[in-house]
Amino acid sequence: MYLPFEEMPDHARIWVYQSDRKLTPEEEKSVSEKLRDFCQKWNTHGTLMPTSYDIKLGKFIILAVDESQLGASGCSIDSSVKTLKTIEDELGLNLLNRGKVSYMDGEEVATTTLPDIKNHITSGKLVRDTYIFNPVVEKKQDLEKKWMISAEESWLNKYFNN
């Protein structure tokens, strides 16, 4: 059962998927239609769950489930991943590979791979106070204070001379 993202409670469980590139407006519309349709039917063991999605900054897809009455099962989570895999294949995106780091580069979101992150730091593109996106936030309320954090507040701190 789909609900607008703003209506999801702060305690709703979320999953954040980051794209390797920014979606075009047409792609964002297509993804939004697919996710809304998916959320209308998203269920656990045949029971519909209050669910939603959001697309932020043209690069991040966030799925949300209110588990206060019924938790998401492994099968229901698998169905969401299958939907994202379909979107990924149709649009030539990289959504499911967790080996990416996204950060603010001026007004844009830059995305790099884990093996290349040190180069971004040594070149000065990514510094201590650069905002990075924490893809492992778990609750909707975390989007406000734990999703965008400075690089030095993250696991990247180990790469800076302390």
Image (cartoon, rainbow, N blue to C red):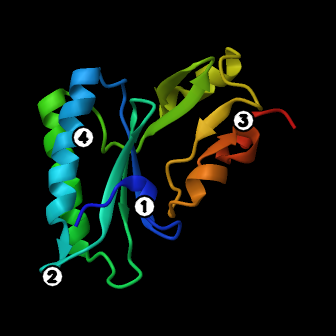
Q: Is residue 20 above or below residue 72?
A: above
Secondary structure under tag 2 reads loop
Q: Is residue 117 above or below residue 81?
A: above
Residue closest to the eye, 105 or 155? 105
Q: Residue at point 66% right, 47% down?
A: 155
Which of pointers 4 and 2 indicates the residue nearer the eye? 4
Determine crowd level at label 2: few under 14, some 14-19, many 20+ residues with C-alpha closer than 10 A. few
Residue closest to the eye, 135 or 27? 27
Q: Which residue is mark 1?
A: 7
Q: Residue at point 24% right, 40% down?
A: 32
**Residue sitting at the far bottom:** 69
Q: CA distance from mark 4 to mark 1?
A: 17 Å
Which of pointers 4 and 1 indicates the residue nearer the eye? 1
In this rendering, position of residue 77 left or right of residue 141: left
Q: Which residue is mark 3?
A: 159
Q: CA distance from mark 4 to mark 3?
A: 37 Å
Sequence-wise, which precedes: disc 3 or disc 2? 2
